[in-house]
Image (tube, grey):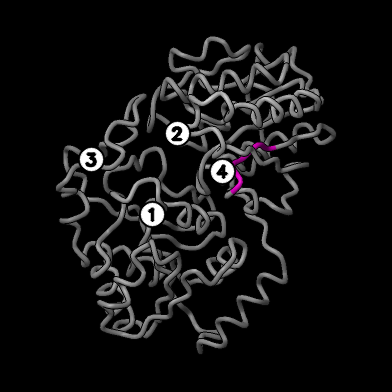
């Protein structure tokens, strides 16, 4: 325990991660450190509604709490009426009497910083822990933020847990899956002729936050055809119609199983856990594959691989990128920068199928 943590004896901890699927999964090693170090302490996690199901059944936390974030985002943030539900919500949080808040966020944008400070201050917690990039001196226990990619995201969050005196020898991601989820996925695979057969999961999307992360759909189709030709292994597409799945199917030169828009989050996790390989861009689905210890080929372009490469301490993974001088251009130093990349997106447009195939061959061969 460090000097800064020696006077911290938490009884009720509120952890905050208002982000997307992969970001939530990346805080789970820190949550494990908190749980193992403070087994009798109540630990609650505040998340966005669309990620709440991800950690249902997790032993690392006591409660998953949803923040009705969309009711006061965007232009609505300037309308006084939009803040009334938030005020009521914050009062309910304060009533929980959390003595410690740990904020798993970078303080990147002015509006984001303001909202986080208001929310955290309103809880009334005496101890507040978070990253300080020059804007976090209001935390009672600030931790230096050296910028995106100076450390892996998982490592930053473990640093915050360490400030509370928490650590664990197990730094793997946590994604609980039930026996029922596994059984349902086994039935789905059997209906598609993949019972007891190896298969590759491909996710051609990247979520809606940044479409610039996506590799071209015809290249996914060509990759699937080459893997089937060389190894006799089928490819399974996951995601939604908005994840370029129809475009991959249209370009396919070999049979591809389409399970897009057909799986719950936990069923998707179970599917990933049974796959021989996952191939996809920087996305929440990629981090789900990491949590399920599936071999991963992760395709990176504009975003920062030094921050968000798959965290796989117990399974093999490869990051495939061109490494041109302007990449990464998103999430560098302390700035979001070019979240949507540049119009040319040469970092992905020039990334050939053979480049990705080589990484797939390494993992499929067990090299």
| Magenta portion: prevailing SS class | strand
- Tell which circle, 3 or 1, labels the residue nearer the N-terminal end: 1
**Does residue 188 show up magenta in the picture?**
no
Report the number of numbered marks.
Answer: 4
- Tell which circle, 4 or 1, labels the residue nearer the N-terminal end: 4
Across and down, in percent, residue 13 comes to 74, 28
> Is residue 267 rendered to the left or right of residue 278?
right
Looking at the image, is mark 3 or mark 2 nearer the viewer?
A: 2
Mark number for residue 74?
Answer: 2
Mark number for residue 327?
Answer: 3
Looking at the image, is mark 1 or mark 2 nearer the viewer?
A: 2
Q: Height in image: 173 above or below 194?
A: above
* Cα–Cα gap, marks 3 and 1: 17 Å
For mark 3, give the secondary structure. loop
Across and down, in percent, residue 303 comes to 32, 42
- Tell which circle, 4 or 3, labels the residue nearer the N-terminal end: 4
- Tell which circle, 3 or 2, labels the residue nearer the N-terminal end: 2
Question: Label 4 belongs to which residue?
Answer: 24
Pick out the residue farthest to the right.
40
Name the residue at 40% across, 51% down. 208
Name the residue at 28% across, 72% down. 223
Across and down, in percent, residue 22 comes to 50, 47
Question: Label 1 belongs to which residue?
Answer: 206
The quarter of the picture where the N terminus appears is: top right
The quarter of the picture where the C terminus appears is: bottom left
Q: Which of 51 and 181 is in front in this view?
A: 51
Across and down, in percent, residue 354 comes to 21, 67
């Amino acid at each position: 325990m460090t000097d800064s943590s020696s006077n911290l004896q938490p009884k009720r901890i509120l952890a905050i991660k208002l982000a997307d699927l992969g970001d939530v999964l990346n805080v789970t090693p820190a949550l494990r450190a908190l749980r193992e170090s403070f087994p009798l302490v109540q630990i609650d996690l505040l998340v966005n509604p669309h990620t709440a199901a991800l950690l249902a059944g997790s032993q690392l936390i006591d409660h998953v709490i949803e923040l009705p974030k969309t009711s006061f985002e965007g232009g609505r943030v300037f309308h006084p009426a939009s803040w009334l539900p938030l005020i009521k919500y914050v009062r309910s949080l304060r009533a929980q009497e959390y003595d410690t808040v740990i904020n798993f966020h970078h303080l990147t944008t002015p509006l984001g910083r303001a909202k986080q400070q208001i929310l955290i201050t309103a809880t009334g917690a005496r101890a507040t822990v978070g990253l300080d990039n020059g804007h976090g001196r209001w935390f009672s226990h600030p931790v230096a933020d050296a910028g995106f990619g100076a450390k892996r995201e998982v490592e930053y969050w473990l640093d915050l847990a360490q400030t509370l005196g928490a650590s664990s020898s197990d730094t793997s991601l946590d994604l609980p899956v039930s026996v029922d989820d596994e059984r349902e996925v086994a039935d789905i695979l059997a209906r598609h002729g993949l019972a007891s057969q190896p298969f590759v999961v491909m996710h051609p999307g990247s979520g809606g936050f940044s479409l610039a992360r996506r590799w071209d759909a015809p290249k996914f189709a060509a990759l699937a055809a080459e893997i089937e030709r060389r190894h006799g292994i089928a490819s399974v597409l996951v995601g939604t119609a908005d994840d370029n799945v129809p475009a991959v199917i249209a370009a396919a030169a070999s049979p591809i199983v389409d399970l897009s828009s057909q799986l719950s989050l936990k069923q998707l996790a179970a599917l990933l856990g049974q796959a021989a390989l996952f191939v996809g861009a920087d996305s929440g689905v990629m981090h789900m594959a990491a949590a399920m210890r599936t071999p991963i080929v992760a395709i990176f372009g504009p975003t920062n691989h030094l921050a968000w490469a798959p965290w796989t301490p117990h399974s093999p993974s490869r990051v495939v990128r061109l490494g041109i001088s302007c990449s990464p251009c998103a999430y560098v130093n302390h700035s979001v920068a070019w979240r949507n990349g540049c119009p040319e997106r040469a970092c992905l447009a020039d990334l050939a199928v053979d480049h990705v195939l080589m990484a797939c061959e390494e993992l499929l061969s067990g090299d």
